[in-house]
Amino acid sequence: MSAGSAGTALGPRCPRLHFDHHAPNERAALERLCADLRRDGGIAWSDAYDGFWVVGGFDLVDEVLRNPALFFSGRRDGGRSAGLGIPTFRTPAFIPGEVDPPDHRPYRDLLLPFLGKSAMAGLAPVVAEIVDGLLEDIARKRAFDVVSDLGNAVPGIVTMHLLGLPYEAWGRIVRPVHDTHNVEPGSAAAAEVQRQMDAVLGELTDLIARRRREPADDLTSHLVRASEPHALDDHEVLSLQLAVLFGGVGTTAEAIANSLLYLQHDAALRARLAEGPHAADIVEELLRYITPAQSSARTVARDTELGGQRLHGGQRILLLLLGSANRDAQRFDRPDAVLPDRERRRHVVFGGGVHTCTGQWLARLELTTTLRAFVRRFPDYRIDENAAVPFAVQSIHAGWLGMPAVVEAS
Ligand code: HEM
């Protein structure tokens, strides 16, 4: 990855870089690239994938997120171009993430009875019970893996609960979701992940058919019961199930693992989290610091200016570096420190504007419940950082493949 400046047809003194967000990279290298990008005005042109704008300053990222008419998320050309992937994902368009207003809203509203803030009181005891069960297993084992035994498991099992699948299915359903971020396109490993994902799609499709026959009180039943004018066909129900699956399990797992890694080095913060009253603020600040979903994308609808650069309408997709925006010193004082009492707090961890994460309240509930219960029960846990294995690609998700740890008997 390298950055340079050029006065070209792209704009006066347009910073240019070769940034391939799918290529293996280390966190430190990504952070350096983001720091350079912010220093050079927060926007640059990358020549990867036929060229796209990279945006990483807080104000610019926020401006793009809040203007969906000018910077849209939807697919074009019958789903073949644009959307949230650079290059365009080879799947059908994601609902609701790759649907633009006004069609977007009804889909989003259908998720809110299960994911909105007011649904959390009902979910809190469920999440607490799931976390307690996992901590009990960890206490028995003492040597465990933060990723597979806790980070992946909490949102994995909670997602089974939401969708209406048996809890014990979580491993096989969630594994290919995590693995999609870690296989090279076209490789044998990618073919195996696709095979597992096809099996997941089969299970979800069977569940839809069962719930159409016999509704229960889960999200899948709620979606199949939706009536005119927003009755959903099976494809739409499946897509919303996948939004919950893909939206919720990786991001929350990454937040749990990275939080415990950070907290290992900050005994005072651990103690404060265990006490409770400031747990929500601590989680919010850890989220900003970590930013599990590091980037998203948009397409420019028509010629416009952003950060002093001339952008053209059409296929130029913007890569939004949310992680970079959340470490912007012009927005956050001492951005690389975790300071739960900071005054300026609004971040873009969950995006912003019409597509702001629908699962944000559930994510906060899962994180607060898990992290607090964990540090209370195992205040002196030890993660073996040398043995921890990060995702090879850090520009899309700040994730870990494995993170061995031990706890004292409790
Ligand atoms: C720490 C955990 C999470 C993080 C960091 C996160 C991050 C995000 C971000 C950045 C977006 C916006 C993407 C964009 O505008 O391009 C988003 C959207 C979304 N997220 Fe999350 N998410 C988290 C947890 C969840 C959970 C638990 C669920 C569901 C159970 C979920 C479901 C969704 C859905 C459905 C959308 C699309 C919203 C729309 O387009 O209207 N997310 N998430």
Image (cartoon, rainbow, N blue to C red):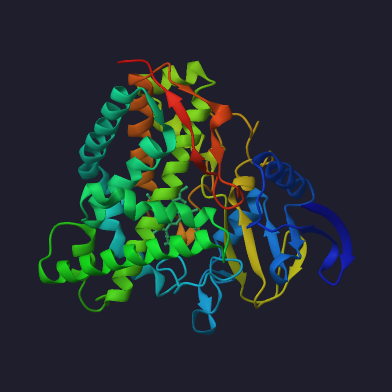
Q: From the viewer's perspective, is residue 393 above or below residue 404?
A: below
Residue sitting at the far bottom: 77
Work out whether residue 115 or residue 375 is closer to the camera in this orientation and state it: 375
- Residue 31, by quadrant, is top right
Q: Quadrant of residue 336?
A: top right
x and y, in percent, of residue 324 in the image: 64, 46
Q: Residue visible at 60% across and 61% down? A: 64
**Residue at horizontal 29%, vertical 69%?**
237
In this view of the protein, can residue 338 be seen by the observer?
A: no
Point out residue 319 in the picture as x, y percentages from the top left corner: 63, 60
User: In this view of the protein, which residue sits in the foreground, 57 or 85?
Assistant: 85
Query: Would residue 224 be seen by someone viewing this image from the given angle?
Result: yes
Going by the image, does 47 lie left or right of 320? right
Can you give x and y, in whole percent of width and height, for residue 380 in the image?
43, 16
In the picture, the quarter occupied by the C terminus is top left
Residue reaching furthest to the right: 7
Q: Residue at x 20, y 75 (%)?
A: 227
Ligand 1 found in image quarter: bottom left
Q: Position of residue 267 (x, y in %)?
A: 49, 16
Give the residue at the far front of this rendering.
188
Count up the numbered dots. 0
